[in-house]
Amino acid sequence: MNQSSRSAICAAVCDKISAAHPSQIEALIGLDGFVDEIIHVVDKRASAMEFKRMETIAAFSRRTAEAAGQSANIELVRVQRKLGGNGPIMANAMATMGFDVTYMGGVGYPEIHPVFQPMAQIARVLGIAEPCNTDALEFLDGKLMLGKLGPIADINWASLQDRVGREKIISVVKSSRLIATVNWTMLAWMNEIWEHLIADVFPQIEMQGKMMFIDLADPEKRTVEDLAAALKLLQRLQKHVQVILGLNLKEAQQVARALQLPDVPPGDAAAHRYAVDIHSALKLSCVVVHPRSGAAAADDYGSGWFAGPFVKEPKISTGAGDHFNAGFVSGRLLGLGLTESLCMGTAVSGFYVRNAASPKQAQLAEFVRNLPSPQE
């Protein structure tokens, strides 16, 4: 993609965002919930107030490896405490852009946890379990997510029926254009929830025109057999609703292996190849793959790639992928083309990592108007 075509896409997306009425579109998102501690790891401390952070995961790895057979004192500095989880971050981003969002998940029960109260001011929030906790160790080249997942076991179909109610679930699904269930990897009961949606909810509703977004959320710790079974369930969901599968590059590699697809050579074209191959294999409505440099997608009408506004030193990286997901599905909901939706996804993520905040509709339109080129 050359600069002139990228600029033309940005101009078109800016105009469409500015003219959109997202408040007229309802979305149901779930089901996880985390309290995130954004943490920097101290490399050298100069004073009580000043320190140099470890900049790379490799440096952190060396420090911990050198402690083998001895010991190490590693200092962690909390930079921010915020709402977390793939679902809440995605939901909060869409609500900030103006969509009519209902969030259902582990955000506190019977009372909403204080960290989710700001989201409850701009979206309907239904808690079914206490939130989990994540220590997000951030480096310039990535992040390490250290999770404490005790309450996750309470996120299941029985809790949804007991604490939200079957009729309420059916009602919200009926009114929503988008249903998003994210963080399959950590939610051990997600397959069961999908089975009940297929058997008990979707047959009660006219599903024509509805979208369902799925984010697996790093399935490395699940077995290949588990992942393959989940992918078969996505094909069953596709018979009822337009399924969009969102993957980062690592997740795309894992899905491709589970599907026994040929290896894809590394490089700029890898994301596009994975999107096309996985879409062809699963026959879902859309597969989107978002590496750090941009994003690619394939649907029944073609495929595309968009070079995002990559920044080498983000203010925050935890939640960048969830913001991409929010932007991409928002583009789909607003009727944007495939490449335009990729532009919107990378723009929402790019704004977030630069500002450590989700963009409002007008802020996003202005950011897209002058979308930065990716940094080398």
Image (spheres, rainbow, N blue to C red):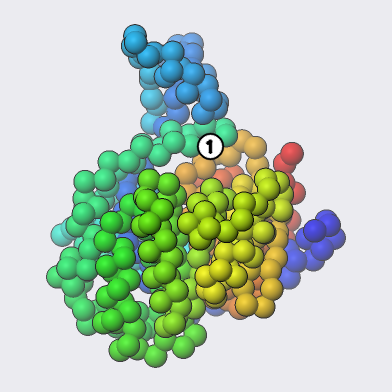
Nearer to the camera, 191 or 281: 281
> Can see residue 271?
yes
Q: Residue at x 35, y 64 (%)?
A: 30
Instruction: Indicate left or right for 292 with 329 as reference.
Output: right
Q: Residue at x 61, y 35 (%)?
A: 313
Q: Residue at x 39, y 70 (%)?
A: 233
Choose top left, top right, bottom left or bottom right for residue 15.
bottom right
Q: State the quadrant of the N terminus.
A: bottom right
Whole-percent x and y of residue 227? 40, 58
Nearer to the camera, 64 or 162: 64
37 relative to 121, above or below = above
Nearer to the camera, 72 or 50: 72
Amino acid at the residue labelled 1: Gly
Whole-percent x and y of residue 79? 42, 33
286 relative to 141, above or below = below
Q: Residues within 10 Å of mark 1 (few under 14, many from 20)?
A: some
Instruction: Indicate left or right for 300 with 50 as reference.
Output: right
Whole-percent x and y of residue 92? 42, 59
Whole-percent x and y of residue 303? 68, 69
Q: Residue at x 36, y 50 (%)?
A: 222
66 relative to 260, above or below = above
Residue tagged by mark 1? 142
Q: In what element is the residue under mark 1?
A: strand
